[in-house]
Amino acid sequence: MKSLVPVEKKHKVFGLMAEFESPGDLIHAAHEAHKYGFRRMDGYSPYPIEELAEALGFHKNRLPLVVLIGGLLGCIGGYSMQYYIAAVNYATNIGGRPYNSWVAFIPVTFECTILCAAFSAVLGMIALNGLPTPYHPVFNVNRFALATRDRFFLMIESRDPLFNLEETGNFLKNLKAREVSEVGH
């Protein structure tokens, strides 16, 4: 077990990152950190780990609500557009049919609903994930390049109310981290 690897002193600390050798170690560390009370943390691995989101405490997802609102706006907008054109702006009585022929409006209303829901899903996902993020402080840690190969990382951010540089570093070392590094801005 190596000691804390310091980052240059002129940089503010973004958090502490612990390196683990297996996904089981990472999940165990995330469970322990969540039990301890840390909430501002993230896990990095070379492949998706289903249990990691639960271990980190990610339970809320606002994307379904964004998609629902987008779909409802598309539905209302598609129907309103057709109603305005057929019954208000260019009202033409053809064959004695009513101006508001809602049955004829269903296909376009459905397609507008799907289109707006899909756009809101993409834009909502981008916004809720904080993208685009061309730079993240974790890239200041040299060993983080191993996250694309065979290492697993848990980072606790300094914004966490329980974060204390020494205590958090000792906590991560006690979780059998291979190495604990400071992440600078």
Image: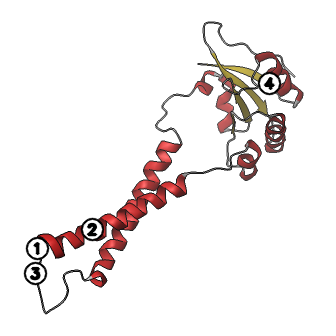
Q: Residue at x 83, y 16 (%)?
A: 3
**Given the current orientation, which residue lies at the most extreme bottom position?**
95
Q: Which is nearer the N-term, disc 2 or disc 1?
A: 2
Q: Position of residue 25 (x, y in %)?
A: 84, 40
> Gap between marks 2 and 4, in whole Å?
60 Å
| Quadrant location, the N terminus | top right
> Gap between marks 3 and 2, in whole Å?
17 Å
The image quadrant that residue 140 belongs to is: top right
Q: Nearer the viewer, residue 164 or 169?
A: 164
Mark 4 vs mark 1: give the one in front. 1
Q: Is 4 on the left-hand or right-hand side of 89?
A: right
Q: Nearer the viewer, residue 183 or 156?
A: 156
Question: Which residue carries the number 3 mark?
Answer: 92
* Residue type marked 4: Glu
Q: Which is nearer the N-term, disc 4 or disc 3?
A: 3
Q: Give the numbered dot on residue 90.
A: 1
Q: Are marks 2 and 1 in contact (CB under 8 Å)?
A: no
Question: Which residue carries the number 2 mark?
Answer: 80
Dot 2: what SS? helix
Q: Is 171 on the left-hand or right-hand side of 156?
A: right
Q: How many callouts does the rendering have? A: 4
* Residue type marked 1: Tyr
Q: Are marks 1 and 3 in contact (CB under 8 Å)?
A: yes
Q: Is residue 4 visible?
A: no
Mark 2 vs mark 4: give the one in front. 2
